[in-house]
């Protein structure tokens, strides 16, 4: 090893060629038109520091370094960088790099300028993003290639990179760096492209384009053209021609700015055909990676090249339009996860617990460590919600989405940074809290999105519900039913612990409370089916309730006394739930279904079913099913199905957690939480196959059912319905519509 060509590299090669290198190789291999090049691998850097003996010197400099001491950090960084940049590269390494460059010239048939980019081996890993901390050098030729390679190596020691490694607990000696050397495209035109809408995930490709090199967009000196292509309707739905007063281009190897006359400045950069070609390449890249991409492209001699592609995580500054300046100029106070979309401006009210909820007035910003069911009335009044803790499936996230209140969760420090009385604006999509009142920017407002007729899909699109009072709102999405009615939020919101009602001889009171709340949801959706899930709250969540003091203290509540296992242990409670449901059926609300959570054993289904029958629930009138959310249930699906099920529903939040051994609530390992991990997908695929054989309906109600890129895969695997969060119903329906049409077209083409 030493030098690896793009066609020798794949996405698994991050440790050898770094994130950037692996990505380029992966695309090149898959015939995505990236300019050719090679990577000087991470081992070469190690050889360099070892053979020249500077390794020890670097280690010595970093030993006992206090990274909080900014001045010393900066001095140490400077000394190491100078050392790396001034140490001659051993002859054998130099030879290999030069030979590769000459080979590239030969392949291209003319003198080439290259881009030299550092590609750190820990870069681009979620949660450990070193991206942007290493350097890129453009228009490099043979003369100064070696010089810039060393500069890339030394970028491993910028103060920020050193600081980050210490903060994230990476050892300096474990992080290495590769260098990408790639032919520069002498672009006539270039720009960026989001293969799907970067905020909403809608199937709209957005292309920004300028004449010359793409740096003009980044510099902000010109307003690029913007093209919006609707991937469902297959047409260009919006073109905004920008004022491109200049272009950046290359002259004799130097980057220069050239002024454009008025006519050229207002000329459209891309033809319809070029946009379409870009969209098609974008679709190939997106489907290859299985997630929307943020792509940099360039056109040279009429040929399109893809220079870079990364998953869309958030809107990048360079693609923001003029209108967004206002927003980007606002002071960011704190960031977290965008858990419920929308903008909310108001006065901060930090609340420490349920007792303080009266502080929150209509239109305030509710800030708290984590919301609890008692806070729902205040959440309803709030203009937005911000929490310290939580992920996309925490209480605050689920409830705010249903109430339609913007929310940012998992900010870690909101209760410290935001103070009572501060005026702030919360962007629940991007997960940002700004100081003051910031205008909402509706980027694509002018674009007519929805088709006028409702989309009819063969795969049903359902919605998840937790708050009965918000059921009408959920039904207004036009969803085909409720694929998951989580009753724990409503139970945790009652006056006391369910078992306290039962122990105190007030079971009827409890049944009545359940009945009344369930009824609201069934009526809002009648006659569409509502699958009610029996109680699934971990012990730690019950503890705060009156009567919750007897809850066992568990080291790991996620693996503990929850779901159907608990309800079978506290059988009276399960009977209470079934009796409430029986009352509804007797009243004619037969659109109810019953779903058991956290099933792992056949006996659980058998016992629950026996109790159901004992309680007089007519199984011929209603649907009965289970969640598949433990690997055990997936692996023994055939045995479970044989017990008699109408449906199963994938709980991918838990299924992912248990398959990958990644605690879904632990932010330290959140970067490993991947519902599309091959192991999870394999279990899903297996279960769908068996269920189809037995005529059992399949559905998904985990958070992944709200992600269009996951939904695409599930529809291809033959899932019968998808239950999404309220705010995602529309996007999910559009995805399903498109993917079903594609499947049908593919079939027709094969006929
Ligand atoms: C799941 O596990 O995916 C699920 C939908 O259940 P919950 O998030 O309530 O555990
Ligand atoms: Mg679950």
Image (spheres, grey):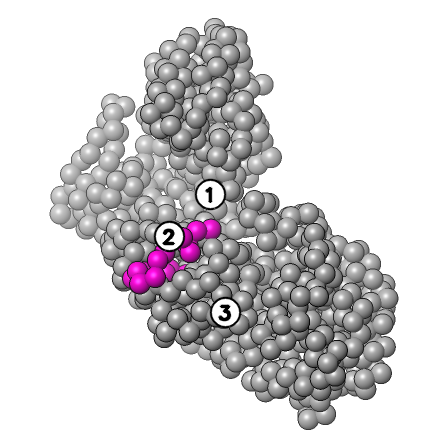
Closer mark to the observer between disc 2 and disc 1: 2
Identify the residue shown where x is 63% and y is 76%: 496
Residue 462 in which image quadrant: bottom right
Q: Position of residue 362 (x, y in %)?
A: 36, 75
Label 3 sits on a secondary structure element that is: helix
Quadrant assignment for the C terminus: bottom right
| Tag 3–tag 1 contact (CB < 8 Å) | no
The residue sitting at the left extreme is 262
Task: Give the alpha-carbon distance from disc 3 to disc 1, as whole Å.
Answer: 43 Å
Q: Which labelled disc corresponds to residue 354?
A: 3
Near mark 3 (Cα within 10 A), the count class, few <14, some 14-19 or many ≥20, is some
Q: Residue 70: x, y in percent?
A: 35, 28
The disc label shown at residue 310, or none:
1
**Mark 3 sits near ligand 1, with its Cβ under 8 Å away:** no
Among numbered discs 3 and 1, the one appearing first in the sequence: 1
Q: Is residue 540 left or right of residue 317?
A: right
Most extreme residue toward the bottom is: 587
| Residue positioned 47% across, 12% down in the render | 57
Residue 610: x %, y % from top left = 85, 77
CA separation, marks 2 and 1? 32 Å
In the image, is residue 401 above or below residue 475? above
Say whether residue 344 is left or right of residue 167.
left
Element at label 1: strand
Q: Are marks 2 and 1 in contact (CB under 8 Å)?
A: no
Spatial CA span between label 2 and label 3: 21 Å
Label 2 vs 1, first from the N-terminus = 1
Mark number, residue 417: 2
- Please, is residue 48 above or below residue 344 in the view? above
Highlighted range, magenta: 412-428
Total numbered labels placed on residues in the image: 3
> On residue 275, which mark appears?
none
**Whole-percent x and y of residue 625?**
75, 72
């Amino acid at each position: 090893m030493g030098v690896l060509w793009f066609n020798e590299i794949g996405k698994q090669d991050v440790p050898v060629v770094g994130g950037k290198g692996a990505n380029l190789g992966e695309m090149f291999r898959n015939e995505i038109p990236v300019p050719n090049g090679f990577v000087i691998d991470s081992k070469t850097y190690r050889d360099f520091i070892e053979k020249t003996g500077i390794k020890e010197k670097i280690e010595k400099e970093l030993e006992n370094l206090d990274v909080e001491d900014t001045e010393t950090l900066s001095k140490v960084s400077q000394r190491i960088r100078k050392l790396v940049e001034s140490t001659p590269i051993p002859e054998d390494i130099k030879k290999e790099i030069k030979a590769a460059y000459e080979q590239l010239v030969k392949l291209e048939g003319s003198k080439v300028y290259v881009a030299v980019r550092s590609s750190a081996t820990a870069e681009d890993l979620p949660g450990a993003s070193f991206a942007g901390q290493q350097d890129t050098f453009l228009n490099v030729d043979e003369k100064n290639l070696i010089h810039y390679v060393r500069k890339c190596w030394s970028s491993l020691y910028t103060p920020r990179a050193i600081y980050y490694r210490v903060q994230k607990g990476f050892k300096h000696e474990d992080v290495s760096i590769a260098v990408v050397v790639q032919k520069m495209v002498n672009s006539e035109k270039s720009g960026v492209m989001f293969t799907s809408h970067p905020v909403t995930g809608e199937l709209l490709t957005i292309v920004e384009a300028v004449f010359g090199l793409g740096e003009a967009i980044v510099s902000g000196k010109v307003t690029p053209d913007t093209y919006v292509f609707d991937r469902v309707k297959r047409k260009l739905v919006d073109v905004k021609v920008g004022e491109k007063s200049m272009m950046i281009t290359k002259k004799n190897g130097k980057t220069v700015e050239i002024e454009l006359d008025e006519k050229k400045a207002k000329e459209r950069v891309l033809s319809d055909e070029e946009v379409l070609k870009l969209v098609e390449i974008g679709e190939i890249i997106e489907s290859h990676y299985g997630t929307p991409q943020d792509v940099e492209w360039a056109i040279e001699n009429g040929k399109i090249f893809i220079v870079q592609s990364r998953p869309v995580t958030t809107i990048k500054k360079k693609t923001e339009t003029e209108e967004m300046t206002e927003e980007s100029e606002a002071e960011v106070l704190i960031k977290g996860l965008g858990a419920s979309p929308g903008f909310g401006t108001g006065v901060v009210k930090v609340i420490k617990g349920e007792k303080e909820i009266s502080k929150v007035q209509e239109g305030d910003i509710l800030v708290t460590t984590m919301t609890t069911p008692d806070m729902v009335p205040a959440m309803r009044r709030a203009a937005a919600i911000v929490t310290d803790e939580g992920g996309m499936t925490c209480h605050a996230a689920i409830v705010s989405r249903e109430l339609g209140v913007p929310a940012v969760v998992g900010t870690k420090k909101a209760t410290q940074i935001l103070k009572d009385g501060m005026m702030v604006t919360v962007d629940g999509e991007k997960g940002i809290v700004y100081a003051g009142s910031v205008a909402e920017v509706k980027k694509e407002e002018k674009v007519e999105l929805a088709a006028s007729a409702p989309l009819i899909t063969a795969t049903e699109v359902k919605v998840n519900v937790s708050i009965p009072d918000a059921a009408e709102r959920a039904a207004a999405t036009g969803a085909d039913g409720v694929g998951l009615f989580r009753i724990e939020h409503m139970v945790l919101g009652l006056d006391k612990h369910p078992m306290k009602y039962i122990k105190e001889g007030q079971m009827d009171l409890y049944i009545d409370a359940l009945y009344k709340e369930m009824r609201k949801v069934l009526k809002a959706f009648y006659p569409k089916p509502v699958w009610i899930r029996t109680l699934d709250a971990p012990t730690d969540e019950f503890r705060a309730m009156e009567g919750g003091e007897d809850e066992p203290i568990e080291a790991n509540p996620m693996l503990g006394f929850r779901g159907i296992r608990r309800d079978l242990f506290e059988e009276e409670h399960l009977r209470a739930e079934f009796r409430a449901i029986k009352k509804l059926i007797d009243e004619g609300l037969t659109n109810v279904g019953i779903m058991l959570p956290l099933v792992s054993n056949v006996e659980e289904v058998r016992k629950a079913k026996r109790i159901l029958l004992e309680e007089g629930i007519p199984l011929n009138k209603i649907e009965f099913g289970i969640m598949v959310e433990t690997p055990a249930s997936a692996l023994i699906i055939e045995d479970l199905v044989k017990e008699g099920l109408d449906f199963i529903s994938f709980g991918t939040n838990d299924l992912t957690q248990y398959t990958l051994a990644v605690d879904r609530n632990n932010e330290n390992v959140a970067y490993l939480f991947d519902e599309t991990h091959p192991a999870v997908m394999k279990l899903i695929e297996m279960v769908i196959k068996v269920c189809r054989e037995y005529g059992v309906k399949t559905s998904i109600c985990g958070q992944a059912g709200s992600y269009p890129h996951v939904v695409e895969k599930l529809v291809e695997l033959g899932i019968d319905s998808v239950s999404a969060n309220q705010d995602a119903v529309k996007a999910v329906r559009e995805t399903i519509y498109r993917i079903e049409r594609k499947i049908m077209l593919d079939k027709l083409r094969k006929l």
